[in-house]
Image (tube, rainbow, N blue to C red):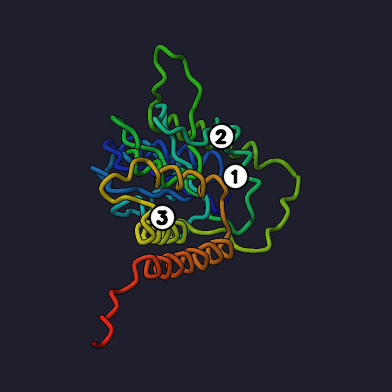
Amino acid sequence: MRNVRIVLVEPSHPGNIGGAARAMKNMGLNQLWLVNPKRYPDPQADWRAAGALDVLDTTHVVADVASAIAGCHWVVGTSTRSRRIPWPTASPKQIAQQIVSQPAQSNIAILFGREDNGLTNEELQRCHYHLQIPAAAQYPSLNLAMAVQVVCYEIYQASLKDDPVPAWDRKMATAEQLEGMLDHLQQVLIEIDFLDVDNPGKLMTRLRRLFVRQQLDDTEIQILRGIFKHFGIAGKTIGSESNPPPQSPPPP
């Protein structure tokens, strides 16, 4: 529980920040992160937090999502919309069960989007899973603080289980390590002429989905980057052999 951070992305109303802090404390969570809040600190946040001012006192305020998920090994984004390229999606109860099954040292972030339009596609692509709260089709949009309450409740319920979690032999990869690996892969694919920078299509999005779905550890990231490095070297060598430099004409 202590490794789970709740991230509110650009919340516009301070009352929702206070309400989220209270919902978190009700369920034993205390890591609140705010990405570029419109109004914070604010008396309305304090008033809505009620007995959870200690959560607000330790709140982290950062400029962007990358900073909010820095050091995290598993990232979940809340969304009510379907995507052109589907992403692994689960309910709050399913997400909670996966959270408590993560290795003990894993840092986990759950992103909640803006009150008016949620998370962007780019922000959602940084997530291993998308979380959707089941609701009536006529009006599926929840208030931000209410959504936080639902998710925190399920995490708390899942944490009450006594089943031990098997230890993993390596640390899980952080969000930064994953981004670095994907940047490396993209550069290699360009170098070997597999990815057309003028017409990239959805190739990198689908590769991103592949790797986030596997939840790599840091050793696996290093192995893959070593392979990518040799792909790049091999591609350059093959390219030079297929296009040899012009030979000098023989002497007369």
Please determine whether, in this image, residue 252 is positioned above or below residue 52.
Answer: below
Q: Secondary structure at mark 3?
A: loop
Label 1 or label 2, whichever comes before in sequence order: 1
The residue tagged 2 is: 153
In the rendered image of this protein, does residue 166 appear above or below residue 231?
above
Label disc, if present, on residue 99 of the rendered structure: 1
Tag 1: residue type? Ile
Depth check, mark 3 against mark 2: the one in front is 2
* Extreme residue in the right direction: 163
| Percent x, y of residue 215 | 56, 51
Nearer-the-camera pick, 249 or 27: 249
Q: Quadrant of the C terminus?
A: bottom left
What amino acid does circle 3 point to? Thr
Residue occupied by mark 3: 58
> In front: 120, or 245?
245
Inspect this view and state whether residue 124 appears: yes
**On screen, residue 239 above or below 76:** below
* Residues packed near mark 3 inside 10 Å, few (<14), some (14 to 19) or many (20 plus): few
- Cα separation, mark 3 vs mark 2, equals 21 Å
Label 1 or label 3, whichever comes before in sequence order: 3
Quarter where residue 243 is shown? bottom left
Foreground mark, 1 or 3, reads 1
Which residue appears at 34% of the width and 43% of the height?
122
Q: Residue 127, percent across and down?
A: 45, 44
Image x and y of residue 94, in percent: 60, 34
Q: Give neighbour class at mark 1: few <14, some 14-19, many 20+ (Cα, 10 Å).
A: many
